[in-house]
Image (tube, rainbow, N blue to C red):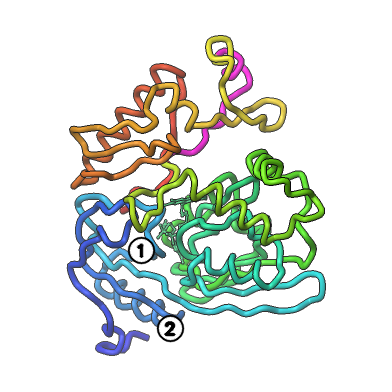
Amino acid sequence: MYTGSYMLDGLQENISLKNYSTMRLGGVARYLVEVQDYHDIQRIVEWADSQSLPVVMIGQGSNIIWKDEGYPGVVIVNRVPGYELQDQGEQQFVIVGAGESWDEVVERTVASGLSGLECLSLIPGTVGATPVQNVGAYGKEVADCLVCVQAYDRVEKRMVVIPKSDCGFSYRNSRFKGDDHGRFFITSVTFSLTIRKPMPPFYASLQAYFGKHSISSSDITAQVVRDAVIAIRTEKLPDPKVVANAGSFFHNPIISTYQLDEIKEKYPGIVYWSVGDDEAKISAGWLLEQLGLKGYHEPNTGMAIWDKQALVFVNEKATSTAQLIAFRDAVMKEVKARFGIDLVQEPQLLP
Ligand SMILES: Cc1cc2nc3c(=O)[nH]c(=O)nc-3n(C[C@H](O)[C@H](O)[C@H](O)COP(=O)(O)OP(=O)(O)OC[C@H]3O[C@@H](n4cnc5c(N)ncnc54)[C@H](O)[C@@H]3O)c2cc1C
């Protein structure tokens, strides 16, 4: 139960949200608090409910855009620590606190000789956010290794364990990002990893890297894959600590093969991946490149597109989320006009 002043420890008022989004935009949170464990979460939620305030949980803000209006309730920043390895022989379970830095956890598992997370190296953010958008890269997604998440359920008002089969995972999505956003506050995630070496086939750009560096299949370990992923990512993606951005700004759109064939007639070089027999996933970055937007600097909004990866929007001089949205809308309009495709934004606009 809510215990008054103890609960209010650490609760800050009127905090700029610019420091809680790697895009560095947004208004002010009425309240903000960092939490270390489930008891903190429960107390804050009870207090917020007693005040009829909305609550949102975040990690490092690398996949959110705050509105200029700010947040009218309590922003909970997840700092729940923890790392526990359960040795089951060839298979190993790792139970990790949601507030841990994702890449530090990947580094730790790889250093322990475990395989499973290495393709997801260098993705910014916390462990607890990875199931939310089912983070993915280089042909792998977090759902591939996830066993279950432990979370505080705001509806049931208790801790729950949600197995992978109930997480509603799909491409860059889950129930935590969709219908149940705001219901579950994830406190830890359990992964199943293996001591076996990663096996081919590898994602095309990884395979190309191995070829270029004369790395043969028998030399490939989780550490080799991690090193390759870090090298490739560092080459083409901006470091959010230095350059304000939120990674890929759009999902790769999935269209019908019929629509693909129509586009191909005009643009035979279109970059896509088949999804089953009837659909194809189009490279959104390729679409933006065709519009000449790679490396584009927009003077009116202060937004830009990264010169080494057209899918990454960069906040160079924007001072408001309204400017970012104006830029986004203009880009989406151009893509629609040229290719007939509706792009879908990846980072969540909050609240
Ligand atoms: C340079 C760059 C590269 C990126 N590359 C990739 C990539 O390759 N693949 C990819 O998938 N993503 C990528 N991203 C996006 C981002 O890093 C991931 O989505 C990451 O998991 C977000 O973690 P976070 O802690 O910053 O979450 P936040 O941005 O703080 O939150 C994201 C969402 O998760 C919710 N949330 C956060 N923590 C919890 C919790 N404990 N419980 C419940 N809900 C929670 C928030 O409410 C919000 O809806 C990239 C971003 C950047 C800036």
Outermost residue to the top: 265
| 67, above or below 155, in the image | above
Residue 147 horizontal side relative to residue 177, left or right:
right
**Residue at horizontal 55%, vertical 54%?**
230
Graded by Cα atoms within 10 Å as few (under 14), some (14 to 19) or many (20 or more), the crowding at tag 1 reads some
**Residue at horizontal 21%, vertical 36%?**
301
Residue 212 spot, x, y in % from top left: 67, 41
Residue 235 horizontal side relative to residue 61, left or right:
right
Residue 323 spot, x, y in % from top left: 22, 39
| 23, above or below 286, in the image | below
**Residue at horizontal 56%, vertical 29%?**
282
Quadrant the N terminus occupies: bottom left
Asked if the magenta segment contains residue 235, the reply would be no
- State if disc 2 and disc 1 touch (CB < 8 Å): no
Q: Check residue 269 in the rendering and tell me which mark sits there, or answer none.
A: none
Residue 177 horizontal side relative to residue 333, left or right:
right
Mark sitting earlier along the chain (1/2) = 2
Q: Check residue 39 in the rendering and tell me which mark sits there, or answer none.
A: 2
Mark 1, residue position? 56
Graded by Cα atoms within 10 Å as few (under 14), some (14 to 19) or many (20 or more), the crowding at tag 2 reads few
Residue 252 spot, x, y in % from top left: 52, 35
**Residue at horizontal 55%, vertical 51%?**
231
For disc 1, does the CB lie below 8 Å from ligand 1?
A: yes
Toward which corner of the image does residue 227 lie, by quadrant? bottom right
The three-letter code of the residue at mark 1 reads Val
| 327, above or below 115, in the image | above
Residue 99 spot, x, y in % from top left: 46, 71
In this rendered view, identify the residue nearer to me: 74 or 304.
Answer: 304
> What segment is highlighted magenta in the picture?
250-262
What is the C-alpha distance between the residues marked 1 and 2? 16 Å
